[in-house]
Image: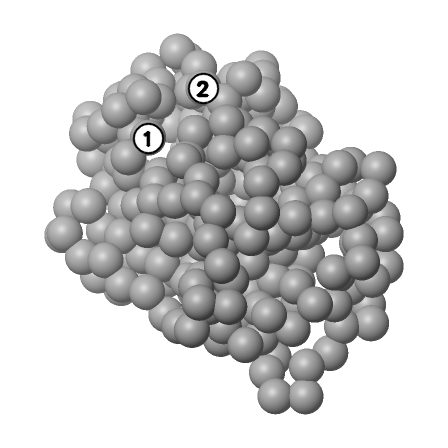
Amino acid sequence: MNIKVLMFDLDGTLLTSNGIVSKNSLDTLKCAKEKGYHIGICTGREALSVKDLLPEWGLEGLIDSIVGTGGAEVLDLSLNVHETNHFLEGNLIKEIVSHYQDMDVNFAIPYNGMIYAPFENDMIKLLSKFDKIPYEIVDFDKFLIEPKPKVMIVCEEMVMDQVIERSKTFKSSQYKSASLKTASVLYEYMNPNISKTGGIQKILDYHNFALQECCCFGDADNDFDMIKNAGIGVVMGNGSSHTKSVANYITDDNDHDGIANFINNILFKM
C-alpha cells in the first residue's frame, strides 16, 4: 500500500494528556515531512484556532492541512484555501439549548478562533484553558442569527450520562442534526452531512490523492468513520472500543508515543 498522506486527530491522539506533542512524535513528523508525506490534522476543534496553536505545539511548518469542526471546515495551508460547509442553523441551536435548559450544563460554539458561550461558569473556563482558546460570553439570540459550525454541551463528567439520555428525546420539526459524545465532558451537535472522512476527501481532492493513500490516526468515537474509510486506520491504545473495532492497527496510547512507534516501526517499513 502506497501511503502518501498522514492525518491525525488531536486530543487523545497527537496530543498527550498534558496537551503537548511529544519529542518523539515531533521528530517522527519531521522525518515523515522529509520523506514527502502530506501531513494533516483532522479534529473536532475549529480550524483557525488550531492554526494559531501550531507554533506552540512545535508543528509550524510541518502541517500541510487542517480539517476542522469534524469536517465542516477544510484549511489547506499549502494552497492557502479555507472552505466551510454544512453549518447548523441558528434556530436549530436555539432548540437544542432549550432542550437542555433545566440541566446543569453550559453551551459552547467554536467560531473564528474563539469559543462563544451564553454564560460563564467553571466548565467554560476549563474548556478555554485546556483548548488554549479565548472565550466570550454573548447573547445567543443575537449571535445565532446566522448559522454556526456546531454546538457543544459542556458538563461535569457525572452529568454526561444524563445528557446522553436527554439527547435521545431531542427532535426538531424543521431541521436535522447528528450528535455524539466527543469527550468525557463534551457532547456535540453538528450537521449530519459532515464527517471527518468528507473533510479529508476535500483535502485529498485538492492534491489528487486517493483515500486509500491516506493513513489516519484517531482515538474517540468521532474518529470512527475516518478510521474505517482510510487506507490504513490506526487507533491509539487509549481509544474507544467502538473505534478500535474498525482499526487496521492499534498502537500504544497517546502518552507512550503511539504515533511515533507505529510510523517508525510499521509504516516506514512497509
Residue at position x 58%, y 21% in the image? 17
Q: CA distance from mark 2 to mark 1?
A: 11 Å
Residue 252 in view (yes/no): yes
Answer few, some or many: residues within 10 Å of disc 1's Cα (few below 14, many 20 plus, some between 14 and 19): some
Residue kind at label 2, given as amino acid type = Ile
Q: Quadrant of the C terminus?
A: top left
Residue 212 pos. (x, y %): 41, 56
Residue 192 in view (yes/no): no
Seen in the image, is 119 located left or right of residue 66? right
Q: Quadrant of residue 34?
A: top left
Determine which of the numbered discs, if any, sits on residue 53 in the image.
1
Residue 60 pos. (x, y %): 23, 28
Residue 225 pos. (x, y %): 57, 58
Residue 177 pos. (x, y %): 61, 73
Question: Where 252 sits versus 39, above or below?
Answer: above
Residue kind at label 1, given as amino acid type = Leu
Q: Which residue is mark 2?
A: 20
Residue at position x 30%, y 30% in the image? 54
